[in-house]
Structure formats: structure tokens, C-alpha cells
Image: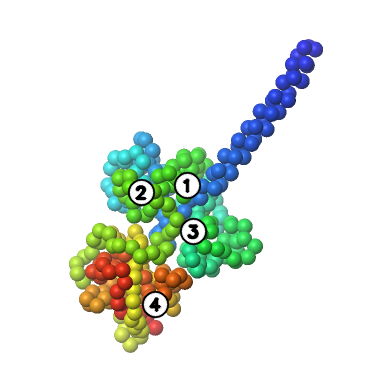
Amino acid sequence: MENFKKLTLIQLPIFMKQTIWLIALMFLSFTSLAQEKIIVQGTFPNIFIQHKVAPSETLYSIGRLYNFSASQLARQNNMQENDVLSVDKILKIPLNKNNFTQDGQSGENEVLIPLHHIVLQGETLFRISQNFGKIRIDFLREWNDLNNDVIKTDQRIVIGHLKVDKKNASIVADRIINENSKNNVTAQQENTDEQPTKKQEVKQTETKVTEEETTPTPVTNGNDDEGFFVSNYIVNNENLAIKTGTAATFKSTSGWTDRKYYVLINDIAPGTIVRLTADNNRSICAKVLGALPEMKENKNLLLRISNAGAAVLGISEKSFPVKVSYPK
């Protein structure tokens, strides 16, 4: 018994050291996870995150992780429901009421994973609130530990949370693409099996305005097709206002297959449907996302249109003249 006591006393410091070391390792792990921010892509309400396919995963198993059916994920990724997924393929996971919350509320068996937006030049907390579904400002302050509404360019701002079943949380955390992921890709690459030819970072949402070259020909219903929003355009000519000026494009995944075109323009309320007409007399109807960000690239521009919309207009130039009509 006396020898046992001596042994226990001798071993105790070693045990304590091991315990402290394990606690330190756990702290470092959680700190590392906290730094791996998940960046939301897309333009509200068509926002999404990305998932990297692991061996043996199917659209069915991935759908269960994010509360979607296999058919819904297939449509989002231009696939067939029974397609075999290649390992490391990047899938687009839409965010909606099934798996996304902007009130901080979770179910009993759910965990919330913060999702971030990277602040663009000229953006304010109010503008971010409006652009992402009119999030309550007090929620934005609380989620981001802000004492006031001052934010800065490139700051990571939580704009909502991914709702995940507790039993799936570790799987999702392991496979979701974050800004530190080695296989991070931009929104233009989420539907291809090809590996990127150069390192790219998810540092912006679709609404970040940079001059882009147009990519593949978008799906339309013919030369007279003005897009998805044409049925919501107010045609009464007596109540229409008209602006003319120079337009440029911004990169967007919308419009290529769903015919939904978007525009950034000052002094027209977000959500307004406008008609854009190019010099070649082609026209489309687009939804206003918000104002042009205050940056030197936008000086002297009337608007920026999603690159799919420019492609439908038959525009390949970086800037071009355009006429905009909209309800007064």
C-alpha cells in the first residue's frame, strides 16, 4: 500500500503535464477551425457554399448532410440525379430555409456554422444587411462582436449560419470548402471535374465587380428572349423613366442556365426590374441587386450587368453604351 502511494505521487505530475498538453492541443485545434472561414458565394437569394466530394459519396448522401434531395442538388449542379461523382469534385450547395438561418435560431439537434461575406470597397453594414435579405443590424453586430457599424474592406463578416444536424457536423466541417482550403475554387469552376490551372481564392461574392470576359453562350429561348424577369417588367410607357450611359460587366454564375440577369446601378431601388437595350437593339430584363460600389473602376459608369446578360445582348467589349428603362 505504501509503495502504491509513492507510485501515485510520482506519476501525478506526469499525468498533470499530459492533461495540460492535451488541453493545449484542443485549444489550438479549435482556434485553427475558427480561422477557417466559409465564404458565401452568389447573389442573394441565389447564394451557395461549396462541398468537396469524398470517396463513395453520392448526391443522395451529400443531400442528407445539407437537407436537400438528390434531384435538387442535381439541378443546382447541372447533373443527373444518378450521376457518379468523381472524388474531389466541387459541388454547389444552395442556401435557403432548409439549411440556412439569419436569426441565430437552431433546432434541438442542430449546430450552427458561421458563414461569411468579404466586405467590398465602399460597403457599409447597412448595405450588407440589405444585400443579404435585410438582416437585422443588431444581429450583424452581435455575430461579429461589433461595438458600432464601422467595418473595413476585406473584413470577414458573418451574414448567417449553416444549420447542420449534430451527427453530421464533423463530416460537413471536413468537406466544406473554406477560404484556407488547398482546393479552393471560384464560382465559375464548381461544375467541372478539371483541376484549376492556377491557385485561386474565394475572396469575393458574385456581386464583387471586376471586369470579366464573357464565358459560354447562355441558354435562351431565341433571339427575342429577354430573360426570366421579363414577365415582371412594367410596360406602361407613361410611367417609365429612361437613363443612358456606359455599362460594364461583373462575374456571376446566374443567367447561364436560369436566364436570370442582374444589374448594379445607382438611384434605382433593389429588386426593381429594368429593361436594358444595347446599340444593336437587343434587350433583356434584369433585376437590380443594389448600387454600384464606390470604387475607381466604376467612375463614369452608369451600371454593371452580370456577364451572362451581356452575352445575351451580344456584347463582348469591356464597356459599352446602354439604355435603361424602369418604372418611375
Give the residue drawn at x 29%, y 51%.
78
Residue carrying label 1: 180
Looking at marks 4 and 3 on the same chain, the residue that comes earlier in the sequence is marked by 3
Secondary structure beneath dot 1 equals loop
Distance CA(mark 4)–CA(mark 3): 25 Å
Q: Where is residue 260 in the image (x, y as percent from the top left)?
A: 32, 65
Asked whether disc 4 touches disc 1, contact meaning CB atoms under 8 Å apart, the reply is no
Residue 45 visible at all = no
For this rendering, which residue is in front, 299 or 131?
A: 299
Give the residue drawn at x 69%, y 29%.
17
Judge left or right: residue 95 versus residue 1: left
For this rendering, which residue is in front, 167 or 317?
A: 317
Residue carrying label 2: 198
Secondary structure beneath dot 4 equals loop
Quadrant assignment for the N terminus: top right
The residue mark sitting in front, 4 or 1, is 4
Question: What colour scheme was applied to this rendering of the protein?
Answer: rainbow
Residue carrying label 4: 300
Asked whether disc 4 touches disc 3, contact meaning CB atoms under 8 Å apart, the reply is no
Q: Residues within 10 Å of mark 2 (few under 14, many from 20)?
A: few
Q: Which image quarter: residue 2?
A: top right
Residue carrying label 3: 118
Secondary structure beneath dot 2 equals loop
Which amino acid type is marked by label 1?
Answer: Asn
Distance CA(mark 4)–CA(mark 1): 36 Å
Judge left or right: residue 175 versus residue 320: right
